[in-house]
Every structure is written in structure tokens, then in C-alpha cells.
Amino acid sequence: MDKWRNLAIGGLMGVAARYLFAGWVYKATGTDFPYGTMAVNLSGCLLVGFFNSLAEVKFLLSPNDRILLMTGFCGAYTTFSTLMLETSNLINDGEMLRAAANFFGSGLLGFLLFRLGACLGTAI
């Protein structure tokens, strides 16, 4: 049950942090460019890389800590960081083609499907 509690707590903290941090960035920079989202995505990559090293290299995070910080907090804060982690893991495993497919496929196909969804929503 601890893992579910940690997941929920981390997710709650992550979504609140995303809302607050992006809002702060938008207040500082304006909304002409999505600096808030970019700042969240980039800082999420920094955090998930840091937490992953603490877990995989330094062995300082328990499985429940990983659920709290990486899956819960970072997952709710930004899934972009998870995309980077999984792409990095594929590269570390020597799977360069699969890493490229994951990275570019998620970006390109995600954008195309977003546009399709927007078109469908507009057509209704």
C-alpha cells in the first residue's frame, strides 16, 4: 500500500508544482511563447535525471522513493521527462534506432494526433 500512497502524494505534489512554477514563469515572461511549459519540461528532465542517478548509480533511493519522486512527482510534473529517461535507457542498451523512434515518434506523432483531435473536436 505504501507504493500507492507514495504515488498519490508524489502526483499531488507534482501537479501543484507544475501549476505554480509554470504560472510564475508566465508572469515573469508573458504568454507570447510557452516559456512556462518549456521551463517545466526542462526542469523535469533535470529532476528525473538527478533522481535516476541517485537510484541507479548512488543507490540512495528505495523503490518506494522512486515511486514517490520519479513516477509520482515527475510523472505529474511533466511526462516529457519520462520520455527523456526512456529514450536514454534505450540508448544505454544500445538501441539507437528504437531510441530515435521513441523520441521522434512521440513528438511527431503526438503533434499529428493532437491536430487530428482538434479537427475532430471542431467538426462536432
Image: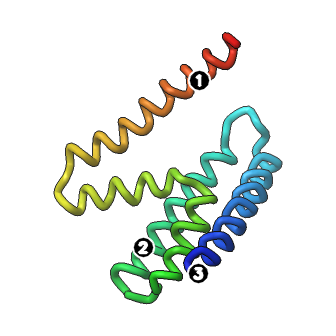
Which type of secondary structure does the marked residue at label 1 adopt?
A: helix
- Residue to which mark 3 is pinned: 1
Res 52 label: 2
Q: What secondary structure is found at the residue carrying circle 2?
A: helix
User: Would residue 69 appear left or right of 59 to someone viewing this image?
Assistant: right
Most foreground residue, 114 or 28: 114
Residue wearing tag 1? 117
Q: Amino acid at mark 2?
A: Asn
Residue drawn at the location 69% of the way across and 47% of the way down: 36
User: Which of the colour schemes (rainbow, by chain, secondary structure, one colour) is used?
Assistant: rainbow
The answer to whether the residue labelled 2 contacts the one labelled 3, judged by CB atoms less than 8 Å apart, is no
| Mark 1 and mark 2 residues within 8 Å of each other at the beta carbon | no
- Please determine whether, in this image, residue 88 is positioned above or below residue 121: below
Mark 3 is on which residue type? Met
Is label 1 or label 2 in front? Answer: 1
Quadrant of the snapshot with the C terminus: top right
Instruction: Count residues near mark 3 (Cα–Cα under 10 Å), then give few for <14, some for 14-19, many for 20+.
Output: few
Q: Position of residue 98 (x, y in %)?
A: 24, 46
The location of residue 121, given as percent across then percent down, is 67, 19
Q: Hey, which quadrant is residue 16 in on the image?
A: bottom right
- Indicate the amino acid at tag 1: Gly
- Between 72 and 56, the one nearer to me in the picture: 72
Mark before the other along the chain sequence, 1 or 3: 3
User: In the displayed structure, does residue 63 sit left or right of residue 43?
Assistant: left
Q: Earlier in the sequence, mark 1 or mark 2?
A: 2
